[in-house]
Image (cartoon, rainbow, N blue to C red):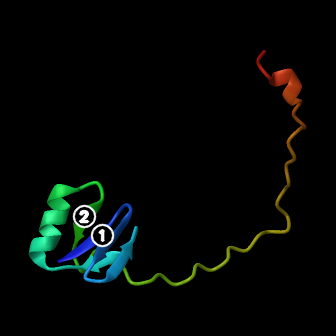
Amino acid sequence: MKVLVKKFTLRYNGATYTAGSVADLPDDVAAALVEASPKEFSAVDAADIAAPSEPVEDVPVDGDSEVVELPPVDFAKNRKK
């Protein structure tokens, strides 16, 4: 069973799985982890694991777009005393 490590780090059989990684563990071990710590681990299906996404193309910027500048802020005037 595959388990998503949501928080912290999991060490199992000499392998280290950091937060955000997916560990392939025996079913009994994975079920015990998910049941004991649902905030730290969750079971995932093979279909849930997405292939690495391709880079997103840059969005072209129109040269005609208007640039709006904000007025300066006086922090001393806005600070509560």
| Picture residue at 38% right of the left edge, 62% below the top | 8
Q: Is residue 68 above or below residue 15?
A: above
The residue labelled by disc 1 is 4
Residue 79 is left or right of residue 46, and the answer is: right
Task: Tell me if mark 2 has few (under 14), some (14-19) or many (20+) residues whose alpha carbon lies within 10 angstroms of its own.
Answer: some
- Residue 59 rendering spot, x and y as whole percentages: 68, 73
* Kind of element beneath mark 2: strand
Q: Nearer the viewer, residue 3 or 32?
A: 32
Residue 48 is left or right of residue 27, and the answer is: right
The residue labelled by disc 2 is 42
Indicate the quadrant where residue 72 lies: top right
The three-letter code of the residue at mark 2 reads Ser
Task: Tell me if mark 1 has few (under 14), some (14-19) or many (20+) residues whose alpha carbon lies within 10 angstroms of its own.
Answer: many
Q: Image quadrant for the N terminus?
A: bottom left
Indicate the quadrant where residue 17 lies: bottom left
| Picture residue at 57% right of the left edge, 82% below the top | 55
- Residue 70 rendering spot, x and y as whole percentages: 85, 42
Instruction: Identify the mark at residue 52; answer none if there is no mark.
Output: none
- Residue 12 rendering spot, x and y as whole percentages: 26, 77
Indicate the quadrant where residue 49 lies: bottom left
